[in-house]
Image (cartoon, grey):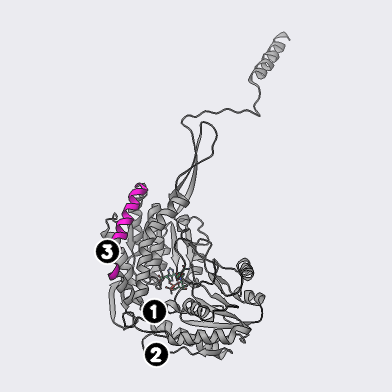
Amino acid sequence: MTELISTEPATGAVLWTGTTGDANQAVADARTAWPGWAAMAVTRRIEAVRRYANRIKSQADTLAKLISRETGKPLWEAHTEVESVIKKIDISVNAYLERTAQRQLKSQPNMRAALRHKPHGVLAVIGPYNFPAHLPNGHIIPALIAGNTVVFKPSEKTPAVGQFLADTFAESGLPTGVVNILQGGPDIGKELTANDGLDGVLFTGSAHTGIALNRQFANRPDKILALEMGGNNPIIGWDTDDIHSAAVMIVQSAFLSSGQRCSAASRLIVKDSLYDRLVSEVKRISNRLIIDEPFSTPAPFMGPVIDNKVADGLTESFLALMSHGGQPIKHMARPFGDRPFLTPGIIDVTRMKERPDLELFGPLLQVIRVNDFDEAIAEANNTRYGLSAALIGGNAQQYDQFWSNSRAGIVNWNKLTVGASSEAPFGGIGLSGNHRPSAYYAADYCAYPVVSMEADQAHASIGIGLKDEMADAIEAATAAAAAAAE
Ligand code: NAD
Ligand code: SIN
């Protein structure tokens, strides 16, 4: 066991201290609890998660404040995260019933054919720090409804929020061992995923970690692995009469949550003739954004990034882009000394020969100037990732072209790249996921289908390919009579 400390990014104050957990014990506890939980009627499992939602509702302010303190995100934004946690229960119940409920299939007379789903068993849920409540919750709730038990490893950067969720599950009367919290960082995550007692891993985090998990489970087709990973998401700025609205959508897509959203726009692809007006409006609005502590007044648009290491990495990336030919439009700065606040950085990378296809997880927007729409689409797809993509402006025909040719799991028109609905599937292709989208489709990877043909009596006959019994008897009798006559 080693000590784990969580500090508030906005203030540097210590928020939470604890120790790392025991992965083997957590899996063993989940395994012990599993048969009872899986055998329980689904209605009772749903009741249990509804009790949890009610407890979250009654402590919504406390949880929102905790999220703000631990991540640095503004309080108004933390409240929207808590809302998503609560809404997830009804959404998951609907998804379970729609996608994995028991169903009668067409069958022969005197026969029933049933489609039912079974839980996998014990699932690890490994969470990121940027939505420390909403994203793990988005895996835990569907997993529980389907009848799995869970070992939940929150990000080592947000253990307090993870603990809050686990305590709330316990206070809601879930049987012991159904949700087990395992605190710790990548090492504990490795111990957890190496435990053969797991039946699967539901992961949200970077492509780097997701690829490591994919490799680790390459020869284990018996384990379910759902990977929700990052993005290098494009937003195209095209002809529009409303430059201001276009710029607002670009700013929100790039800089909400200080750019720490998997669906954040990191590449603005803009039509040459629109460049000056659109980019200067994006810069003007970005200059006006209030960047401050989560509880400050007036309310900030964005807070700090998660820690100084991440902030340093982002400012270094900005400089690296500059040193490789990027033209700064708005410098990324550290306005509050040694705390990890960043001002949005905007840089034109059009002339860079080789642009790094990396997820730079923070408020950093790269701008690429193009001449025509085909070039814009080619630039949008010029990434190994494929999470979200948006076209701002343009016409219906161009949107059709964009939609048809975009390689991403979310393709929007005149809407942000971020702010996906939990009532829709959420996932991407390429390095953004392994074709197991989450949100509404989480039900699919939390249970596996079992098809059964059933009849009350065993009743069967072979109609074709059998020798005629009577002919066989006559043949035998004839042979015997012939033998006797000899
Ligand atoms: P991360 O990959 O560094 O860590 C995620 C989790 O994995 C943490 O709990 C960490 O402790 C654990 N971990 C790290 N290495 C591990 C290993 N080898 N084995 C097992 N567990 C391990 O990601 P992060 O920095 O916490 O989160 C930010 C990333 O998450 C970004 O890339 C972002 O795009 C992505 N993200 C994706 C989605 C999505 O739904 N697609 C949503 C939110 C965030
Ligand atoms: C995320 O999960 O990181 C972002 C979700 C969204 O805003 O679309």
- The residue type indicated by label 3 comes to Ser
How far is disc 3 from disc 1 in space, using C-alphas?
A: 27 Å
One can see residue 51 in this view: yes
Q: Decide: few, some or many residues near mark 3? Use Cα within 10 Å; few <14, some 14-19, many ≥20.
A: few
In magenta, the rendered stretch is: 40-62
Mark before the other along the chain sequence, 2 or 1: 1
- The residue type indicated by label 2 comes to Pro
> Which quadrant is the N terminus positioned in?
bottom left
Q: Is residue 148 left or right of residue 379?
A: left
Q: Is residue 105 left or right of residue 378?
A: left
Tags 2 and 3 touching, CB below 8 Å? no
Q: Decide: few, some or many residues near mark 1? Use Cα within 10 Å; few <14, some 14-19, many ≥20.
A: many
Disc 2 designates what residue?
335
Picture coordinates of residue 348, whole percent (x, y): 57, 86
Report the residue at 46% width, 81% height from top.
363
Picture coordinates of residue 73, whole percent (x, y): 37, 77
Disc 1 designates what residue?
306
Above or below residue 316? Residue 77 is above
How far is disc 2 from disc 3 in space, using C-alphas?
A: 37 Å
Mark 2 against mark 3, which lies toward the viewer? Answer: 3
